[in-house]
Amino acid sequence: MEIDLSKNSENSWTEILSLRLNVNKPAKYLTLVTEESRVEEGKKNTERNPKNLRKHLSSIRLYRKLQSGIDTDFYEKITKKFLDDFYPKKCINPACEERILDKEISTRPDIIRCSKCHRQQSRLSYTPLMGLKLPLYMFGVVFHESFLQFPKVLTATEISKRLGIEYKSALTLKRRFQLFCSDQLPKYKVLTYQALEEEYKGFKLDPNIETDVAPKMGLKPYVSADSCVLYSTSQRANKGRSRYRHGGLTSSIYMNKSLGGRQIGTLVHGICVQNGPAFFESVSDTKANTIGPLLVEQIPYSVPLFTDQGYPYLYNLYKNHRSVNHSSKSKESRSGFARNRFQKHNVHSQTIEGNFRLLKSSFSSYCYIKPEYSKLYLDEFSFIKTAKFFGLDCITERCFGSHFFWVRRSTGAGSATVVRIGQEKYPHRRSTKETKKWLFQAIKNRKYQELENEERLRRDKEQNKYVLNSAEAISRRRKTLAGEMKRFNDFWSDNQKSKHKRKRELKYENLSFKIWNSIQYYKETSGEHPSVQYIADRFKLDKRTLMIILRKWLKYGLIQKRKLFNKESHDRRVDFSIVQRSDSLPHLLYTQFPRIKNQLQKEVR
């Protein structure tokens, strides 16, 4: 299969990256020379003139390079197409009206000029390849092989052996490719966000977590999120000592305190779509303040998000959030864990678990990577995996739009315009001495910033699995309700509160938002207001527990009760219709009641 990569060709990146060269078939320019003929020719040259020995050695190196099986013309055209599509150059002459430079110079592949005024400009400036001393075809090999070998990663050692260059040069070449992936990955994030927003527009799951989600989900793709550890520390790495902490994922990435407590492993948080894109980010911990912004940035609020029970703070943020308990115990005493601990009511997180399996098996080829460079490696893996779904043509600078849909899942994803992200303003060659180290500075800006020991210890003491009331939300409420919201913030900001009080309060708050969403869902689907008995039966609650929440809402005017007209006179049970009077539910305390002044005076006496 031959593909034309000339300037006027219209080949897409999908056709180019699907091309697999037949390495067993020798190229036309290869001259097969045996070892015996090479030795005999060398003897003749050295006998005639010893000075020809250096020329003989250079010819051997030339033969080795030709027999490596690399079509330099093909990969050089890939590099040129890469620069033309992702980093096109425009003429700065006002008379040309920002004409795109497309005139090549045969003897200088790194220069391109205007076809009208013939102004020359470097092809590599303001790109990740700026200041490249190696031939252009070498980056084409790295670019092409990285896509063809996925999910296997292309290591710097493999690049060094394939191209016959030093390891340091091969590592720098890979760093340039990783910079390109980091530059272009935000485009895929916005495209994914727009596709999910269109796919799940107005989508709502039943607030009751005991209902099956399969009829409502249909063929829509599952969106999952979770965290995992790469290259965890062992007791051998800690010189026989125990690890940094006793539980959680962070115990696997930090060394012991007596050894400095520095980070050795990598903690990865992943967000993926079933049979679609996946994004991985290097994080320092699994706190709400760390992972919450990542979820809000990449997932719309209407998307049904499936996780394990490590995200208790998402009950109010994502109303369609569902979690599965991986530690649920069996009812029978003879067995430990329950059978449905990985999937219950078609709620599971196997989508992200499968991607973590792919990530771990692929990164085993690296043997080990430092945590400071983990962001570059994860951006590269996320970019290639997402490009396999969307393609490269929809993010090029010359593309104006793209239509895509979820393959074999749903056809209603809609369309999205290409996000135009400006070129990275890499420093120009004619600048000061600082521009000579622009590559190291660009890599430094994209490194993972490890937390200091004191900051990490401070975050460990914080129990921030909650969301506080904002100052803007408090200012919009009445005086009595605003005071109760401030008391909620004071309760969770006080680190002296006992653990069982926090746990009980978190349980009631989680339940209160489920009841509030259930009242809204019942009103939208049936057009009527639900009763107390309906809510108690639906969530299998005792009315005393339910009335603790409802009395708090009645006290501050969040709901209004109405008498049931069909209720018989002899029925003395507590039952009435619940009418919502507020658009949103603030965060309130349900089990921590304020102390009465008389009781305080008695305690003082």
Image (spheres, rainbow, N blue to C red):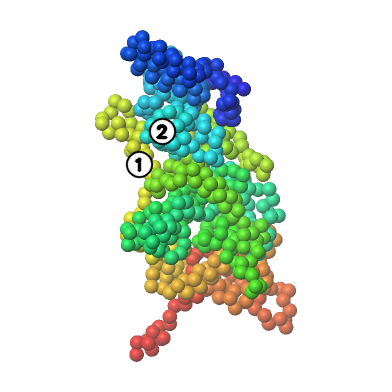
The x and y percentages for residue 479 are: 43, 68
Residue 580 visible (yes or no): no
The x and y percentages for residue 202 are: 62, 51
Binning the other alpha carbons within 10 Å of mark 2 as few (below 14), some (14 to 19) or many (20 upward) gives many
- Compared with 178, 491 (above or below) is below
Residue 342 falls left or right of residue 29: right
Residue at figure coordinates x 38%, y 89% from the top left: 602
Quadrant in the picture for the C terminus: bottom left
The x and y percentages for residue 246 are: 43, 65
Residue at figure coordinates x 44%, y 49% from the top left: 282
Binning the other alpha carbons within 10 Å of mark 1 as few (below 14), some (14 to 19) or many (20 upward) gives few
The front one of 569 and 311 is 311
Q: In front: mark 2 or mark 1? A: 2
Circle number at residue 444:
1
Disc 2 or 1, which lies upstream in sequence? 2
The front one of 159 and 519 is 159
Q: Splitting the image into 4 quarters, where does residue 547 fall?
A: bottom right
Q: Splitting the image into 4 quarters, where does residue 495 fall?
A: bottom left
Residue occupied by mark 2: 170
Quadrant in the picture for the N terminus: top right
Check disc 2 and report its element: helix, strand or loop. helix
The front one of 359 and 113 is 359
Residue farthest toward the left in the current orientation of the protein:
433
At label 2, the amino acid type is Ala
Residue farthest toward the bottom in the current orientation of the protein:
605
At label 1, the amino acid type is Lys
